[in-house]
Amino acid sequence: MINTILGLKKGMTAQFDQHGRRIPVTNIVAEPNVVLAIKDGRIQLGFGRKKKFKKTENAYVKNVGYAPRFIKEVKIDNEKQEIKIGDKMTVSVFELGDLVKVTGITLGKGFTGVVKRWGFAGGPKTHGQSDRHRAPGSIGQTTTPGRVFKGKKMAGHMGVGKLTVTGLEVVNIDPAKNLLEVKGSVPGSRNGFLIIEKTGKLKSYTSAPPPKEKEEETKAKEKSEESEEIKEPKGESKTDPKEEKETEEK
């Protein structure tokens, strides 16, 4: 069975869950993915269409009729589902409550310094350090080793890297619109390419008991008052001390 599908990030919104909590939601549009090839327990999924294609993509055009924009190879389980070239996979492969991991390309931040890129603390703010607030500081030693080690954290280009976010919950599925809504944020810009892979199922949990309503409180008070009345003897009648003095004087 296929647990992976390709799609595009369309933006973020918010909605309320069954417990009344406001949660962030990412909208992913995953048009039907077409099966391009099958080999050794793996298949190639194609997503989107190219206006122009190369000669090396003629095999895809022969099998499907067009060259897909994105291609991804995924694992399958032949025992559970029979798959043929040309079959289309939709968002219906997922269910509500599924846990997925989403892979995408992060936003580009341009050329950034060490404070933003690596979280450096910067230099001191006093003692005449007027231009050392966001400087990297020393990058090496003296004659030994006489060079800067590879991998040194320095300023440079940030972003535009592959990133995978795990443990995201599927909160809504709309096969008619090819829409998949996932709880939380995913990497990438709007219309960015995403790989959505199912990893498991959300474990059920028991929510906290709801707060007591006013009706329940009033009922409890009435019951307590009734119980107090029952405890008092019925034959005795309560009289004020003033009335008792007036009767004695008469």
Image: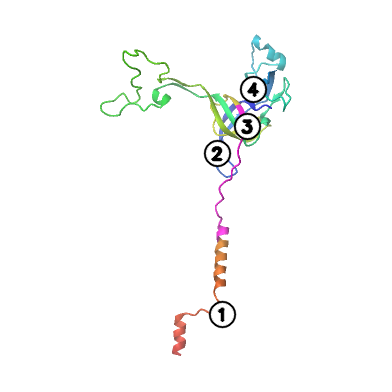
Looking at the rendered structure, which numbered label has been put on residue 23? 2
- Depth check, mark 4 against mark 2: the one in front is 4
What residue span does the magenta drawing correspond to? 196-217
Q: Which residue is mark 4?
A: 74
The amino acid beneath tag 2 is Ile
Q: Earlier along the polypeptide chain: callout 3 or callout 4?
A: 4
The amino acid beneath tag 1 is Gly
The scheme the figure's colours follow is rainbow
Point out the image quarter for the N terminus. Answer: top right
Element type where label 2 sits in the image: strand
Element type where label 4 sits in the image: strand
Q: Is residue 142 shown above or below 235?
A: above
Please give the name of the residue rendered at 54% of the width and 70% of the height, measured from the top-left corner: 228
Q: Which residue is mark 3?
A: 180
Please give the name of the residue rendered at 68% of the width and 11% of the height, measured from the top-left corner: 58
Q: Earlier along the polypeptide chain: callout 1 or callout 3?
A: 3
Residue 211 picture location, percent across and down: 55, 52
Residue 3 picture location, percent across and down: 65, 28
Q: Earlier along the polypeptide chain: callout 3 or callout 2?
A: 2
- Crowding around mark 1 (Cα neighbors within 10 Å: few <14, some 14 to 19, many 20+) is few
Q: Which residue is mark 1?
A: 235
Element type where label 3 sits in the image: strand
